[in-house]
């Protein structure tokens, strides 16, 4: 039992030493890059697209997450004798989501919103133990491709998928996106780090233009998650 306690104590000391060694130093500016994967979806697409005259029991819908790329560049600075640091970022991120529809007439279709954004995020980090940190900040994301969506169905005889897709692209337009980001990160040795984040949309992520489909304008907020690996390089 005594040997077991000694082994556990040594393991705890080693873990603490590893965590402390992994921290980025105070009062030094770093620049760096990040890359990883993102997942996102948009809310209330069904409210925008489906007329309320149809009985709810005659169809079913769901909002699925779409995977994409997330990455960017950043500058890092940790204040002296403080648990706080700042990390302003420029982020490229794929977001959007997939809307799935089925009805009693056996029609099934998917609309995939393939939006991409370039965002600015002034992030504040708070270090808890060693290199472990929680961070937050607003993110203003500027859309790159407002009309990038795809449409596929199981009944193209009702209308060619490509034709419907083009019509949807002229009506449903992605918007710039404002969100609040919350995340947890960990500093690894040699300037590496891992961040896992949630983005909670605040603004309307999709604009519905005047159309003959009886689509209506509605607030569709974006929600996303990302996991990225970052690499920090000191300024010399």
Image (tube, helix red, strand yellow):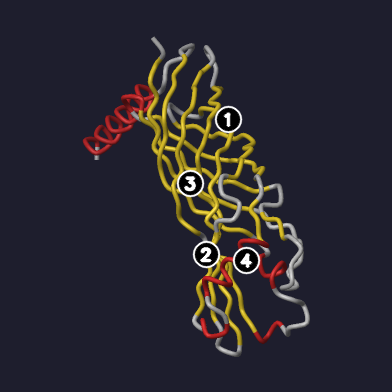
Reading the chain from its start, which is encountered first: label 1 or label 2?
A: 1
Reading the chain from its start, which is encountered first: label 2 or label 4?
A: 2
Q: Which residue is mark 4?
A: 168
What secondary structure is found at the residue carrying circle 2? strand
Q: How many marks?
A: 4
Q: Which mark is residue 45?
A: none
Q: Are marks 2 and 3 in contact (CB under 8 Å)?
A: no
The image shows residue 170 at horizontal and vertical percentages of 65, 61
Q: Residues within 10 Å of mark 4 (few under 14, many from 20)?
A: many
Q: Kindly identify the residue that appears in the image at 62 percent across and 37 percent down.
A: 139
Q: Residue furthest bottom?
A: 105
- Left or right of residue 75, residue 49 in this image: right
Q: Which residue is mark 2?
A: 150
Q: Which residue is mark 3?
A: 226
Reading the chain from its start, which is encountered first: label 2 or label 3?
A: 2
Q: Kindly identify the residue that appears in the image at 21 percent across and 35 percent down.
A: 3
Reading the chain from its start, which is encountered first: label 3 or label 4?
A: 4
What secondary structure is found at the residue carrying circle 3? strand
Q: Nearer the viewer, mark 3 or mark 4?
A: 4
Q: Kindly identify the residue that appears in the image at 32 percent across and 27 percent down.
A: 189
Q: Which residue is mark 1?
A: 123
What secondary structure is found at the residue carrying circle 1? strand
What secondary structure is found at the residue carrying circle 4? helix
Q: Kindly identify the residue that appears in the image at 52 percent across and 12 percent down.
A: 80
- Left or right of residue 91, residue 49 in this image: right
User: Residue 130 is drawn in which quadrant?
Assistant: top left
């Amino acid at each position: 039992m005594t040997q077991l306690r000694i082994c556990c104590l040594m393991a705890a000391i080693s873990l603490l030493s590893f965590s402390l060694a992994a921290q980025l130093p105070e009062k030094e500016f770093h620049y760096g890059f990040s890359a990883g994967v993102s997942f996102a979806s948009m809310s209330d697409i069904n409210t925008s697209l489906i007329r309320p005259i149809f009985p709810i029991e005659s169809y079913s819908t769901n909002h699925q997450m779409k995977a994409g790329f997330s990455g960017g560049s950043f500058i890092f600075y940790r204040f002296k004798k403080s648990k706080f640091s700042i990390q302003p970022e420029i982020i490229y991120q794929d977001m959007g989501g997939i809307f799935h529809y089925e009805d009693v007439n056996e029609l099934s279709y998917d609309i995939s919103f393939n939006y991409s954004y370039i965002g600015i995020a002034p992030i504040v980090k708070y270090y808890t133990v060693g290199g472990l940190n929680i961070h937050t900040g607003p993110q203003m994301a500027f859309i790159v491709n407002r009309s990038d969506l795809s449409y596929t169905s199981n009944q193209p005889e009702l209308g060619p998928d490509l034709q419907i897709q083009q019509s949807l692209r002229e009506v449903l337009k992605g918007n710039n996106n404002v969100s609040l980001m919350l995340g947890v990160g960990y500093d690894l040795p040699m300037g590496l780090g891992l961040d896992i984040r949630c983005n909670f949309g605040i603004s309307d992520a999709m604009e519905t233009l005047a159309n003959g489909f009886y689509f209506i304008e509605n607030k569709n907020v974006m929600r996303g998650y990302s996991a990225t690996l970052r690499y920090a390089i000191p300024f010399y």
